[in-house]
Image (cartoon, rainbow, N blue to C red):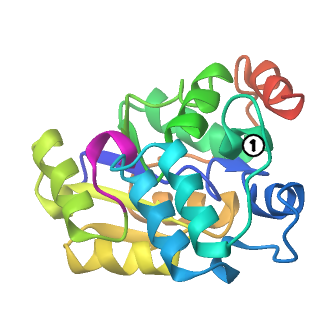
Amino acid sequence: MIKVCMFDMGGVLVRNFMVAPKLLAFLGCSETSFSELPDLFRQALRSHSKGDIAEKELWEIYEKATGSSVVKHEGSLLGKFFEPTLDIPTLKILSELKQQGHRVICGTNVNDSHYTIHHQLHQYDIFDHVYASHLMHRAKPDSSFFQFILQKEQLKPDQLFFTDDMPSNVASAQEQGLISYPYSDASTLRLQLMELGLLQVDNSKQILPNAGSSATVGAHD
């Protein structure tokens, strides 16, 4: 029996979360994705998302890996172009789950600056708890990410529902025994949850209290 529902953040509950195109242009790069940068930097980026290195060290590694200098800036470069907005249809589903008595948590790969911005925009408010990679020192799709959460929640794998827009994360969760589904859109998610008996009725036309204000804050960040 599923006791807890866990959701990814970027690509599931929020949109407009990709910073690479604008950030790399700001840095004077021709690349538009972090995946196009040297492996040394990509490994450092993952280490930063696990909280193992600070952002200052990340950009020092960037300079070493690319041979270019990082422009002077104030605050977090990773947060400079981070403007996430809530996906309201998905937010409504999470609200319905909570109204029907389910515990709803977040399992997310994130860094310190983005985590702070999500909090400032109240985008984590819907969750009973947020499991953030940089605080756990574990990141998806590593099995330890899911094992850590199962232990903290005191759950067996088949008691945890999980959805993510990244196939590799879903596959890893399935290997750990979680009830895992790839996320594509809110309508598909609703059907999945209804088939599992987690949503009893279709309340898709209900208006979520205060949803408009949360979305407005995110859209104007």
Of 142 and 4, nearer the camera is: 142
Q: Inspect the image, locate mark 1, and give the three-letter code of the amino acid beneath it.
A: Phe
Within 10 Å of disc 1 (Cα), the crowding (few <14, some 14-19, many 20+) is many
Q: Residue 220 placed where, x, y %?
A: 90, 28
User: Is any part of residue 195 visible from this angle?
Assistant: yes
Q: In this figure, which residue is indicated by the disc labeled 1?
A: 82
User: Is any part of residue 83 visible from this angle?
Assistant: no
Of 206 and 12, nearer the camera is: 12
Residue stretch in magenta: 133-139
Q: In this view, does 210 lie above or below 151?
A: above
Question: Which picture quadrant has residue 191?
Answer: bottom right
Q: Residue 194 placed where, x, y %?
A: 49, 58
Of 34 and 75, nearer the camera is: 75
- Magenta highlight on residue 134: yes
Q: Residue 136 placed where, x, y %?
A: 27, 44
- Magenta highlight on residue 124: no
